[in-house]
Structures are given as structure tokens and as C-alpha cells.
Amino acid sequence: MGEWKEIAAAVIRTGTAMREDGMTGIAPRDLADIVGRASGLGSRNINLYPGIPADTCHDLAVFVALRSPEYTRSRRGHLAFAEALQLLVRHMQGACTGNTRTAVLVCDEYDRASLDFWRPNLRAIMKNAHLEFYLIEGGHVVELPV
């Protein structure tokens, strides 16, 4: 498993705890705290999507795509897999080229067609940066091949 699997595991734990407490799921505004703690870097030292836009490119960028009712209150504000993947490519090949050295994508739905579409870009990104993709499935974390 990759170095950043703990981020996906933290999303699972938070979603489970919220359901057990009678809450309806993770809101986009909750992600900064979840990801910041799980990464050990704090929310101000990473680029997070969805999240508060930053004017600084950090070493780590995290893209979270949650759509299932198991983890979200509603889909409002959350990214779909295809959206998160497009943002990852724009981040890594756009304004933050050469600055962000690691990108992590965590999702609870997987769109193979989108991954295949962006694969040439992902391969180009992997020449200079590290990518890890994780699927949250049935309370488990599965690393996706990039």
C-alpha cells in the first residue's frame, strides 16, 4: 500500500463515526480537518480539493471525491471522480507543475472511462511526481492502479 493510505482510512473512520452518532455524513468543509490530521501536515500545508482555494502550491495535494450516501450528507459541494481527476491533472500540469510532488486521490466511486481518458496525462505527471489513488469500498481501502 502507498504512503498516504491513512487519508482514505480516516475518511472511512469519520464516516462510520458520524453514522454511529446519528449524523448523516461528511460535509465538504469537514475534509480539511480529516485530511490535515491524517496526513500529519495540518490542513494549511496541503492543497485540498474540494476545499478553500490556496495561493500556494504545497508538496502534497489531496483530491477527495465522495458521492455515496454512506459518506456524504449530500452531493452538494462534493466532487465526482471525473471532476477530481480533472482537477488533479490541472493542478499537477498547470499552476503547480514542479511544486507539488505528491498527489493523492480518494474516492468512493470509480469511473474507469475517466481514468482511461486521463491516463496519458497521469503517466506524464508520474515522470516527475508521485500519484496514489484509493477507492473506499465496503469499509475498506483499495489502492487503484494509476
Image: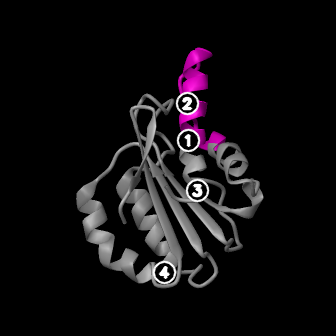
- For badge 1, the amino acid type reads Ala
Q: Helix, strand, or loop for circle 2?
A: helix
The residue under label 4 is 93
Whole-angstrom CA distance, mark 1 to mark 3, is: 9 Å
Q: Is residue 16 above or below residue 87?
A: above
Whole-angstrom CA distance, mark 4 to mark 3, is: 21 Å
Label 2 crowding class (10 Å Cα cut-off): few <14, some 14-19, many 20+?
Answer: many
Query: Given this view, does label 2 or label 1 mark the residue nearer the observer?
Result: 1
Name which residue lies at 61% across and 24% down.
17
The residue under label 3 is 4
The residue under label 1 is 9
Q: Which residues are magenta?
A: 9-30
25, 135: nearer the viewer: 135
Q: Is residue 146 left or right of residue 99?
A: left
Indicate which disc residue 15 carries. 2
Pointer 1 with pointer 4, Cβ within 8 A: no
* The C terminus sits in image quarter: bottom left
Name which residue lies at 55% across and 20% down.
19
Label 1 crowding class (10 Å Cα cut-off): few <14, some 14-19, many 20+?
Answer: some
Q: Is residue 7 left or right of residue 73?
A: right
Query: Given this view, does label 4 or label 3 mark the residue nearer the observer?
Result: 3
Residue 125 colored in magenta in the image? no
Name which residue lies at 44% across and 37% down.
140
- For badge 4, the amino acid type reads Gln
N-terminal of the two: label 1 or label 3?
A: 3
Whole-angstrom CA distance, mark 4 to mark 2, is: 32 Å
N-terminal of the two: label 1 or label 4?
A: 1
- For badge 2, the amino acid type reads Gly
Query: Given this view, does label 4 or label 2 mark the residue nearer the observer?
Result: 2
